[in-house]
Structure formats: structure tokens, C-alpha cells
Amino acid sequence: MDKNRNYRFETRAIHEGIKDHSFEGSTLPPIFQSAAQRHETAESLSQTFAGQTSDHIYMRLSNPTNRFLEEKLANLESGTKAVVTGSGMAAINNACMTLLRAGDEFVASRSLFMSSYLLFTSIFKKYNITVHLVDPLNPEAIQKAITDKTRFVYVETITNPGMEVADIKTIAGIAHNNGIPLLVDNTLASPWLFRPMESGADIVMHSTTKYLSGHGAAIGGVVVDAGNFNWDSKKFADFEPFVQQKGNLAFLHRLWKETHVQFGTTPSPMHSFLTALGLDTLGLRMERHMENTIQAARFLKNHPKVKWVNFIGFEDHQCHDIALSQFKNKGFGAMLTFGLKDQDSCFKFINHLKLILNLANLGDCKSLIIHPYSTQYVSFPDDLKKELADPHLIRFSVGIEHIDDICSDLSQALEQA
Ligand SMILES: *Cc1c(COP(=O)(O)O)cnc(C)c1O
């Protein structure tokens, strides 16, 4: 790559991080399948332990394949530095636990990925940490929920199954006015569609299991630090030793040193390799995902058995305008939800699908469908279950197959619903 050139996203997704003479000319990073690294001298190992070199010691701390992916993802998210983890939940847990102490509070969107919801509302409670859940589309509610104990604001770019789009610039402004950072789970948008740091977000997380991999062959997560937030404040006095060492990258350094290394959230380098392999086609996949989703949404909207379709790309969607102004590539994501007559129709429809897969994942190149009420939310208390997912709702993660094949599978299964 030409160092003096600003390559575009799709080009960087493929070429970024492969240096001309690195890895003996390989065009992909090798899988460094070694639990620890040998050092030539006692001095070298001691210096590395003391943090004076960026060499590797032991796989739980770092690994060359994982580091390759970290540098690439930091670049693609317009951030400064990243830590990759064994799953998206590990990334979210690490980011939150780096900031939270017993007695602290944080403000989060009430529309959360199911595991994040459980982590925030039930697991963190055990540690006397309080989450205030608010409507992510209501900036005043976010401001109102912030107290002097609040350590951060947390939102997802696109929520699921609600299909809401958070206004990141406005929410970042609120967080910063209160001297706290904004954390964003950007999994459903992917950095191809939107890079929250360019709108003021301080920390971005992903489940790389989804669009970033795209093939459904790996699980992983990442935390990216913009490196802009000033941690040198009274509120974050506990960050002082990390600020001394790393300045504005105090957060990511603390995350790495405390939660990542001590909780043990390291990914296997095999999974980082597979994720890097997926990134090569991210730009192209996202284009096809977006195009197919628009067409699938139109098809469903016109089908007599479909009661309603919740798709951000429709002009009358409550978040259409914010999506148009915020998402750079004029896409609306590759997820939609739709309603059938009742749960029985939903089950009949799913049971007749021949191409689209009935499984609990999203962002795969394959089209995936799930009935959230009877699966992800099945063990939730009844009233909460109804609030989070309509029993008539089908969630559809639109894949990159030929759109005619997707629509004909929907059509034949809907006939049976
Ligand atoms: C899947 C997902 C996660 C969790 O990621 P895992 O890799 O499954 O741990 C977190 N947030 C969102 C929005 C997701 O879709």
C-alpha cells in the first residue's frame, strides 16, 4: 500500500495491516498457534513484562494473529486502538467492567441485545451496579437519567428487534456535557454503514461473529477506543495510574490489563484469522445485504399474509430520517421484522422455509429467520417478554443469496402460514 494515499474503506478492509515484507510475503496473517512466546534473554522477557516492549509473552495477554485483527478493526472503525475478545459479550462485559465499580450507575438504551439486557439488569445487580434504562430516541430522557454516579451512556446503533436508530451525535453531546463517555454497540450497522466515532462516540464494540466475519464460521468481539476522551478528571480519578501511562488511551490500556487479561477473554487466533478472512469481502457483502433487504422489505409489505413490516428504509419509519442523515452509504441495515396473524402462523411459516435458515444468529451471508418471543425471550417473565418481543413477530436477517430465491422461499412458506 502507498503510505501517502488515503485508501477508501473497501480497499482498507482488504489490504490494511498486510505490510509488504511481513509474514514472509503472505497475503493473510498466519495463525500463530502458540500458547507462549520464547524470549532470547532474561532481560527481554523482564522488559516485556514491565510493559517496555510490545512483544508477546503468553496468548491470554496477546498474540500476533489477534494483534493483526486489532489493528485492522481499529482502522476500519476510525479508532486508535482495539482489543479483540473471544465473543461479542466478552467485549461488552470488558468495556463495562473497566468503567464500573460497586455503587456506580450507567444509562443504557432500554432496547438492548438480549444478553446485554440480562448482563445489565441481572448480573451487574449482584455487584450493586445500577442501570437506568431509557428510550434511545429520547435525548431528554437520557439527560434526565444521568446522576453524579453515572459512569457512561450505552446505546446500540440499530436496535433489534425494535429497529430503532440512535442519534449518536446528539447522545455523544449529552454524555460529553456530563463529563462521561459514550459506548456504542455497532454490531448491526457494521463500520461499512456507520462509524460511530466519526459522530463523537468514545468506545465502540462489536460482535465480530456477525457482519464482520459474515461466514458464520467464527465467534469473536472487539472493543475499539477512539483515544479522544479525557480521563484526567475528578469523576475518573481511579483512572489516574492508567492516564499517567497511556494518556487518552487510558481506558483501553486498563481494559486490556484488568478485564481482558485477568478475566481471560482472549480469542483463539484461529477465530481471529477467520474474522480477518471475512473482512476481505465486508464492503461487497454489505452492499448486497442492503440491496436485498430493501427488496425483501417491499416484497413482504405487499404480501397479504404479512400484517406489518418494520424496516428503517421505509420513508414512514420513525428512524428513516436519522438513518438517512447518519448512515454514510445510504443503506438501512440488513435486518427487518414483520408480523403474521399469530404465533401459530409464525411457526407454520418457519417450518415451511426451504432455503432461509431458522437459527439464532444474524449478519451471516445466509438469510436467517427466528421467532424471538419463543426463543431468545422464552425464559423471560411474561410481561417483560411481551414488552420486548411481540409474539407475532418474525426477525429476518437478510442474506446475500439471489433476491429472487429469497423472495420465492418467503412466498412459498407464507402460502402455508
Ligand atoms: C450477537 C450480538 C452480541 C453478542 O455477541 P456474541 O459474539 O454472540 O457474544 C452483542 N450485541 C449485538 C447487537 C449482537 O447482535
Image (cartoon, rainbow, N blue to C red):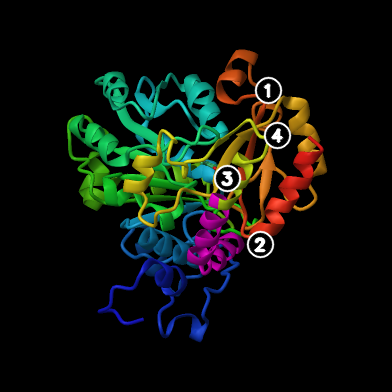
User: Which three-letter amino acid code belongs to the residue tagged 2?
Assistant: His
> Which residue is painted at 57% across and 55% down in the image?
292
Q: Earlier in the sequence, mark 1 or mark 4?
A: 4
Q: How many angstroms separate mark 1 from mark 3 (CA)?
A: 30 Å
Q: Position of residue 249 (x, y in %)?
A: 27, 50
Can the viewer see residue 83? no
User: Which three-letter amino acid code belongs to the residue tagged 1?
Assistant: Ser
Label 2 within 8 A of ligand 1 by Cβ: no
The magenta segment: 269-294
> Which residue is painted at 74% across and 32% down in the image?
346
Q: Earlier in the sequence, mark 4 or mark 3?
A: 3
Vertical placement of residue 364 versus 136, above or below: below
Q: Dot 3, how many residues are within 10 Å of its Cα: few (below 14), some (14-19), or many (20+)?
A: many
Is disc 4 placed on a helix, strand or loop? loop
Q: Earlier in the sequence, mark 2 or mark 1?
A: 1
Q: Earlier in the sequence, mark 1 or mark 3?
A: 3
Circle count: 4
User: Which three-letter amino acid code belongs to the residue tagged 3?
Assistant: Ala
Label 3 within 8 A of ligand 1 by Cβ: no
Quadrant in the picture for the C terminus: top right
Vertical placement of residue 32 versus 5, above or below: above
Which residue, given by chain and number where applicable, does mark 4 sit on?
305
Which residue, given by chain and number where applicable, does mark 2 sit on?
402
Q: Earlier in the sequence, mark 4 or mark 2?
A: 4
